[in-house]
Image (tube, grey):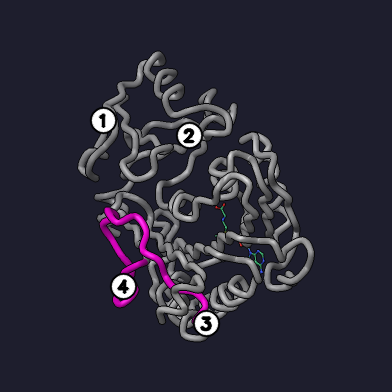
Amino acid sequence: DHYTVTIFPHCRYVRVNTLKTSVADTVDYLKREGFTYLGQARTVEDLTLKGTHFVQDMDIPEILIFSPKTDFHNHFLYKAGHLILQDKASCLPAHVLHPPPGSVVLDACAAPGNKTSHLAALMENRGRLLALDLDAKRLSTMSTLLLRAGVTCQTLRHQDFLKVDPQSAEYREVEYILLDPSCSGSGMVCLRDDSDTDPARLSSLAAFQLKCLKHALSFPRVNRLVYSTCSVHRQENEDVVSACLQENNHFRLVPVLPQWPEHGLPPLSQCLRASPSSTRTHGFFVAMLQRHSETDVALG
Ligand code: SAM
């Protein structure tokens, strides 16, 4: 379709793994190697890059952006775990959740684990990061990926998130949840196929996503939760969040990244959407929910 032809590939994003290195050291290394650093981008127009030019992202500081043909798969910095090859949109959930060092965090549908490794970097490897997945093969890929990234604060579990008991000793202290459940993948512009819009498949995915979201909000100490998908369908995004909030008045949506150009479909303007045209990324959706504090409740 026309997106694939005219907008993709848009640009090459890499996330600097701050567990292993810093943005400044990475920039210096790449400059010595012959790349040309143009500083921090200010607008999406600055992301149109040629040849060896690269910039720092304007929204997520640990992201560096290169021209579309740049390939890091065989690069020393990638093999050493200093660089994570991750689209900017898929860096939003951990960035928005931003659990502080020392916190107790649950990544409910975690494999292959790029968001888990991003969470660990923000936590500076301190605290507890519980990461679950239902798929054993994807979990084993994840454990390799986390090892390369120098992540040490994780506990991996081969487990169905929907069967986790939120009151159990292991889970009742969880304060932050990242919920990135299976979705249609309709935002992944390069991988799209007809099954993305099959109505029966969409309804069953949406029902699963809603179950996961309700379950996540039942953890007794959870204070913040990020829900994300790489789908562009309202049914898997705003509709899931609205349906859940309708039944649960202990949580509210919070606005994030005020400068972000694309928001959730009305009335969910607190959510973020990403797309090739507005943000030069894959299609993506992010919502952050926060527990009402006692004062909020008192103020109605
Ligand atoms: N967050 C991951 C990342 O950034 O690398 C991507 C997660 S992917 C969108 C969704 C994952 O949910 C899949 O790995 C799938 O195996 C897992 N999954 C599906 N149903 C699940 C369940 N009931 N419990 C736990 N994991 C589940």
- Of the 4 image quadrants, the one containing the C terminus is bottom left
Give the spatial CA distance, label 4 vs label 1.
Answer: 34 Å
Which residue is label 1 attached to? 50
The mark that comes first in sequence, 4 or 1, is 1
Q: Is residue 162 above or below residue 288?
A: below
SS label for mark 1: loop
Q: What's drawn in magenta, residue-wise?
A: 248-270
Q: Amino acid at mark 1?
A: Lys
Question: Disc 2 to disc 3, how far (Cα)?
Answer: 37 Å
Helix or strand or loop: what does disc 4 sit on?
A: loop
* Residue drawn 56% across the image and 73% down it: 213
| Residue that label 3 marks | 248
**Which residue type carries mark 2?**
Val
Residue denoted by label 4 = 265
Instruction: Residue under label 2, please give it.
Output: 16
Q: Residue 194, position in %: x, y?
A: 43, 69
Sooner in the amino-acid sequence: mark 4 or mark 3: 3
The three-letter code of the residue at mark 3 reads: Asn
Q: Are marks 2 and 4 in contact (CB under 8 Å)?
A: no
Q: Residue at x 61, y 35 (%)?
A: 149
